[in-house]
Amino acid sequence: MLSGVDDYKTDLEAMEKGADDYLIKSELTAQLLERTFRYSLKSKYLEAKLVKLAHHDSLTSLYNRSIFNELLIKTIQQSQRTGQKIALVTLDLDNFKFVNDNYGHPAGDQLLIKISQRLKHSTRSSDFVARLGGDEFSLLLKDVKNDSDFVKSVENIMDIFQEPFQIDNKSVSVTTSAGIAVFPTDAQTASELIDNSDRAMYQAKALGRNNYSFYNQKLHQEAIVKHQLELELNAAIDNNKLLLHYQPIIDLKTGNITSYEALLRWPDNKNGFRNTEEFIEVAEESSLILKIGDWVFKQACLQLNIWSEQGITDRHISINASANQFNSDDFTELVKKYVNETPDFAQKLTIEITERKPLEITSNIQIRLKVLSDLGIKFSVDDFGIGHSSISYLRAFPMDSIKIDKSIIQNILKFNEDLALCTAIIALGQALSLDVIAEGVETEEIANLLNSLDCPYAQGYLYSKPMPL
Amino acid sequence: MKMGKYSKFKVLIVEDDEDDYILLEELLIEAVGEIGTITWAEDYKSAQASIANEHFDFYFLDNRLGAELGLNLIVEIKQLRQLLCYQE
């Protein structure tokens, strides 16, 4: 605080409001200012230390209960604005008393410190970790996309207890029980969330300890099923358990096969296949979709090489890609890799993008498609006629063909509306110089009608169901 | 001239008399050597704006600022600092 006059009352008021010093302008010297700087810095340091002491647990340096509760309230407010879910995880060690009784309290303290360090390591920097007291910890998990991510995070946390802790050259094993409650699914307020997370933790204890439990059992089950599916899918890719089945695409005028659509199959243990849509959805929520993409491209390259060795050079392959795969450069890089490895690959490849989950028309996505299109890769709109993407889609992206959805094709003999729609899409294809492929052709009558409508290509059970080649 | 210790520090001087501001700035540099930045706010309103927009390490507040009192700025600084404390 600077003042022209030496006024005791102002000096006092300035100090009360939080000023570090009160300086009279006419008395200012370099020496005095240097000392003011130094003293002020020292008091600032002490203040910061006090704040840390007030907010942190002195043993583990994690947040303490009071600040954690404040952070929880603030995070909930944030979540209400952004719509992002958060999870409150309550941990209680299962046999901490045993450690204290058998190794002594200093060893117990050491254990708490080591657990804190591992907890900090197993969470992201955006998550909050606190020690609420005794052997009870709380974690606040934020920035989560899917419920199954909560399961992953909690499993990471449980994993840190797998390895014994080294305390005074002794190996000490300890387990924990964890309860998880999710905002806003399980609670509307901070205190409700704390209560429900606690309840879930006691539920985990009742289930036999060394366990975790979600407050919301339905969410728990779904998340676990998804997580399990993800693990199995990952193993299936690694062990080469996935298959590609091929369905031919026929030139309606000549009856010749021009191309094959490669369809992903995952055999179950009962001579059937697992639901493709279901496991693709799980793959898309994780990074597995890229791994699957990699595998599919590898197989397609192998198949093209086989044809090439057999002297078949005019056959093409269509591969399905989802809109999500174009949200980063990873997929385009992957495709480029295979294009570089296999000569002719780009010229013989069509990427089918479903209209069910349309691509967002953004400049980034347009650039990615353009890069691939420049390499010679063709694009096709799959399931055309039932989604929301419509004609703007055809203008925005470098499309080469349209595949009319089977729900329309199968009804063209029955309903005039479907026939009109089909005719219009064929005309649209002609007008925009796009190839048109009718999907789901199952009878000769439908094939004949399509031929008379000048639909150039068809695909369906009439010709062949998807088969291994 | 001393170097280093305060070279990353940000200082705000709130002073409506330009001569006093220049004098203080010179004395400061003489006192502690190189300072990261020294920002000058010449009235109460621009001081409020600087305080809200930026975090400074040191604030020199002249008390008499026209009809306003520099004292009242201390409260605003403290409030903003408290908010920052929660953001690790």
Image (spheres, coloured by chain):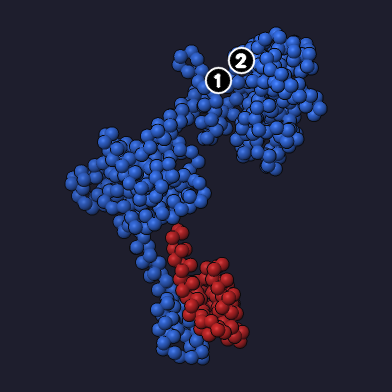
Chain colours: A blue, B red
How far is mark 2 from mark 1, CA to CA? 10 Å
Q: Secondary structure at mark 1?
A: strand
Front residue of A454/A124: it is A454
In percent of width and height, residue A432 lies at 80, 29
| Tag 1: amino acid | Arg
Rendered residue at 30%/37% (across/down) = A204
Q: Is residue A277 above or below residue A31?
A: above
Q: Quadrant of residue B29?
A: bottom right
Chain under numbered label 2: A
Q: Secondary structure at mark 2?
A: loop
Chain under numbered label 1: A
Residue bearing mark 2: A466
Q: Is residue A230 above or below residue A242?
A: below
Residue bearing mark 1: A265
In percent of width and height, residue A438 lies at 70, 19
**Which residue sits furthest left?**
A101
